[in-house]
Amino acid sequence: MKIAIFIFTLAITLSSCKKEENTNGNTSFVPALNYDCRIEKQTFFIKDEPENKQVKEYDYDNYGRLIKITSKYFGFVNPNDSTELLYDAKSRLKFIRSSPGNDTTEIFYYDNQNRIIEAHSIDLDTANEIYYYSYQGSNKDPFEVLFNNLSLSKTSLYALEWSSGNLISSRKIEEDNIPIANPIMIEHTYDNMVNPFKQIGYSSNTLFNSLNSRNNLLEMNSIGDGSSNIISRKYSYNQHNYPITIEEITFSGDVYIRELEYSCN
């Protein structure tokens, strides 16, 4: 049985910025509370297998911050799963903990401009991956990301390009400190509608990908060494310009459906 997988682009950065220590608090950076709609539920399934659904439900605190994502699988193993988000005293995302057992934790570190400069992925108390983010001047979007896979003793350096709050391209330019000749570029194109995931402030340690762009991904293409389409998406929207259905076609031809439900002002 195929399991619905939605592919998102990796991007990461080496930072020369000073890391600011975080004090204990009560979970992630506070998203702007002026959004028209807040995502409450997501349903995933393969178009040809609608009986096998994964449902994600989103819970928020009194400040409007996302604090828990509960996953339910119908027809899959692991009938219940959840992710908890914890914030520091400045209301910035500090920990993401996965259940069952909270064995996997993502930890975020910030500079004095509240930009993420490091993200650590820890499994069973062992740091497996570290992402380092670099910025130019006071820009809020990173221009490079260094990914350090501690388990495999490998590093990868990515160059990123942004426009109007959207990640429009990423290239892996080094591997294990060796420059890559003619690196393949991953290009993204977007709609002009609201990305609900950006608004709620939720990110994984692969923070800078299309989920964190201002708008919704339409296409992701590989440019160079045999160009190809990786993902294409079609959307329908509600009256507030938020996506309510997403049809995604992958490079292999599989078609996935996402249905989104909101609470709106």
Image (tube, rainbow, N blue to C red):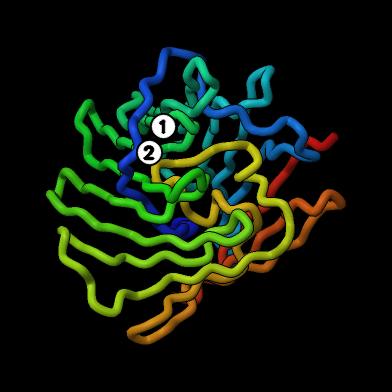
Give the percent coordinates (x, y) of residue 34.
77, 34
Q: Amino acid at mark 2?
A: Ile
Is disc 2 surrounded by few (<14), some (14 to 19) or many (20+) residues within 10 Å?
many
Is there any visible trace of residue 98 in the rendered image? no
152 or 182, nearer to the observer: 182
78 or 146, nearer to the observer: 146
Report the residue at 38% width, 28% height from top. Answer: 100
* Residue 121 vertical placement versus 227 (above, below): above
Q: CA distance from mark 2 to mark 1?
A: 6 Å
> Is residue 37 rendered to the left or right of residue 215?
right
- Residue indicated by mark 1: 111
Question: For residue 117, which numbered disc appears in the image?
Answer: 2
Q: Secondary structure at mark 2?
A: strand
Q: Amino acid at mark 1?
A: Asp
197 or 133, nearer to the observer: 133
Q: Which residue reaches farthest bottom?
A: 226
* Residue 53 vertical placement versus 19 (above, below): below
Report the residue at 43% width, 60% height from top. Answer: 160
Q: Secondary structure at mark 1?
A: loop
Give the percent coordinates (x, y) of residue 237.
78, 57
Q: Nearer the viewer, mark 2 or mark 1?
A: 1
> Is residue 3 rendered to the left or right of residue 103?
right
